[in-house]
Amino acid sequence: MVGTPVLFIAIPLMAAFLIPLLGMIWKELVRIVPGLVLTYLLILSINLLDHVLAHGPIVEVIAGWGPPIGINLVFSALSGFLVVLMEFLGLLVWAYSYRFKRNVDYEPALKYFLMLMMLITGSVGIVLTGDIFNMFVFIEITSISAYGLTAFYKGRNSAEASFKYVMMGSVASTFLLLAIMIIYAQLGTLNMADIANKIHLMNPTLKIVSYIFFVTALGIEAEIFPLNGWAPDAYAEAPGPVGAAFAGIVVKAAVYAIIRYTYTIFDLSGTFNFLIIIGMITLIIAETAAIRQEKLKRMLAYSSIGQMGLVMVAFGFGTEEGVFAALFLMLNHAIIKSLLFFSGSYLTYNSTDKKISEVNGMSKFLPITSLLFALGAFAIVGLPPFAGFWSKLAVMTAAADSNMILIMALVLIVSVVELVYYLRVVNRVYFYKKEADVKPKRPTVNALIVMITLGAIILLVGFYPDAVTGLLHKASAGLMDKTQYIHNVLSVR
Amino acid sequence: MKKVLVILLLAVLGYYTAVTFFDIGFGQPHFVAGVKPVKDIYLAKTVKPLTVSNAVTSIVVNFRGFDTLGEVTVLFLAVTVLGSVLYKKRHAVGERSVLFNASSIVTAGSKLLFPAIILLGAYVFIHGHLSPGGGFQGGVIIATGFLLMLLAYENYSVSHTALSIVESLAGITFAGVGLLGFMHGGTFLQNFLPAGVLNNLFSGGIIPIIYIAVGFKVAAELTGVIYTVLNEKGESNG
Amino acid sequence: MDSTLFSYLDYAVYGTAVIVMLIGFYGAMVKKSLLKIVIGLSVIDSGLNLLIVAIGYYKGGTAPIFSQGFLENFKSVSKMTDPVPQALVLTAIVIGFGVTAVALALVIRLYRHHGTLNIDEIKNLKW
């Protein structure tokens, strides 16, 4: 083995404490070091994932105390897949925002890259940890960085958006702590596997209250209706690349937390139907809201919320096919929505309102960016032969297997709605005349490389889906097998 | 109308929360039958092998030390976010937004108290593994000392560079000691130093070292927060 | 202490904590001033912390510190209060502080931008 999972937390924290000192030596280092850290962690995560697929999950113990005494990290096929995805997207966001707008100055750049690195580290921590209170700590690390990144720009309404997010976020942490304390007061442990092992002993009423508090708290982070009031504003006001990080990294971590609680920890009946219902409501409301939006980033935000609703529905099937479809959706959503945010922020680079009408005729000035935006739009709607098609197909297959015909119809209807509002934007980009007062800005070389990489991945997954399906099947099998998870963790000494 | 709705919502929430915790029960053993709570293991292992007197410290720094690393990071991030949110391009160093006219009794008294407060804070975090208190509490006490000086003297200023150096070094010490645990095939945050004798200052292995680092870090960060907010000068359209 | 008093205390401590939390929620949801909203959020945190610490209490328990006096007079750890909630609440307090500091910084910036703390006059804060 080349390293251990704790390095995903320890190295970025070490670097975060070191960066202010390094910045005193050479100012450029505050931009370079986070990139180096993310590159190293991406390589490490790929190596570890390779090892895990061959030899089974790694359970790492911290401070020498085996579960349930100490905190442990679990690097399984599922968490490994998400960690690779997060580190990869994090690296791309870093490369894209190397000299993006306010990042030119020293002080803002220092804070920006610190917050970005901690956002990724917190999300990775949520995915890796095997302890509910430790997960709370990582959720707070993620949210505080997210508040700061949302309020990063001056002059716009970013402080308002961030304040909304802070309010929702503190309510979320209140509920999370209440739920954790109910479990601790009953079972006397905080380790996930140990809780899952003993959950049948718990008072049923308290179990339900605790589960509801957990889902309320995590639903705020995972943009589940009706708790997603913060999301459209935060996406619209945050810097463009940060929108991609929210959609690709933070939300994925929160969804992972919800499914970990639902599949592994709690043994309540009816939770899967609950996931389907909240997922469907979120999906319908978000997609109907997206079609009415006048600002590009708000439209992308609502589309992102809708996709999360669909992921919830797919997890709610409770079958291995359903989990596979949901994970495939998460992967596709992460790469495609990032591409849309990346290219979308160059299409509306110099405008203050980010109106959809301001992208008119951009294809003549930004041919590559426009082409990539169109590629992303077609892919997320689910047109063959792009990546999104296979995940939607997987959802349909899983729904058919579970005899949920209504959901198949719903997925088709939603795809049509998505097609309408994405085509509206692509149509404007290609076939409208440019508005006179809009000044296009050419993407920098690093931003262009990032976008082309993402576009290439979308095409690769589209034409050759087998590249990822094997891994996703292993990950979904790992999530379904609860006893194996408990055994893996508790057998470590 | 809105108030009525809010009160109704809160009544429901309050009712369920209260009933849940009344079910759990106050002041009596509340763990379900057949469960061996981890707190018994913690209490047993605090004396041996850790040789720490304060069980809360042993949990915070060793058993659940990873949480504390995250907690310190949250503080560090809060300072970073504060600096980012309140950042201004032309930042005049040493300019205060609020000026207080303190009488000579206050200024003289503060000068007298300041060393005592620092000493108390240092005492609290150095003895974190022996008595109530620890890095967080001691750090907060030290920060109140700086707050007192900032309130009493209008031209008192703390070097921002010094604060950020202390903060970084303390953080690196924590994470570095954690990484040193990998020596001899151990794990992150493994206690690799000799345990010493119970109720002695030099006991508990790496626990006092980490708590002293935490103390410095908390003190520097809270002082940084106070200083950033105090030097925040209002601009009409910042 | 006699046992009837304790049975009231049973409800009093949790009840107080929940009521403090509800007061905080009320303030955060109803008040118009940004500062009062932030104060409401930190009142919620206080109530929550009280609730968490109360879970760890046992009747007649001592502080979980193995001081010289404890080692000489008591032999068993069953007389100690639960140290885990105390350790957790330390983390929760620090995190609450961080969130409050960020919220106050945002309030400062909103005030700088709009010249008011009233959320009715800051159009994007209504929902």
Image (cartoon, coloured by chain):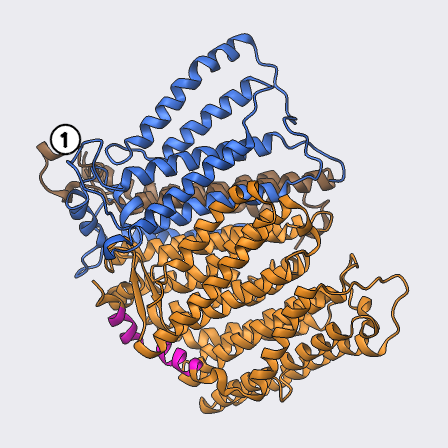
Chain colours: A orange, B blue, C brown
Q: Residue furthest top?
A: B104
Residue A290, picture quadrant:
bottom right
Q: Nearer the viewer, residue C51 or A245?
A: A245
Is A478 one of the magenta-colored residues?
yes
> Residue at left 78%, top 75%?
A367
What is the magenta range?
Answer: A471-488
Q: Nearer the viewer, residue A439 or B108?
A: A439
Does A408 appear above or below C1? below
Q: Residue B78, how many percent across, how many down?
A: 52, 44
The residue labelled by disc 1 is C68
Is B171 one of the magenta-colored residues?
no
Q: Quadrant of the N terminus of chain A?
A: bottom left
Q: Residue C7, how many percent across, how many down?
A: 25, 42
Q: Is residue C7 visible?
A: no
Looking at the magenta stretch, what is its main secondary structure?
helix
Q: Residues within 10 Å of mark 1 (few under 14, many from 20)?
A: few
Query: Disc 1 sits on a residue from what chain?
Result: C
Q: Nearer the viewer, residue B169 or A341?
A: B169
Per the image, label 1 sits on a secondary structure element best described as helix
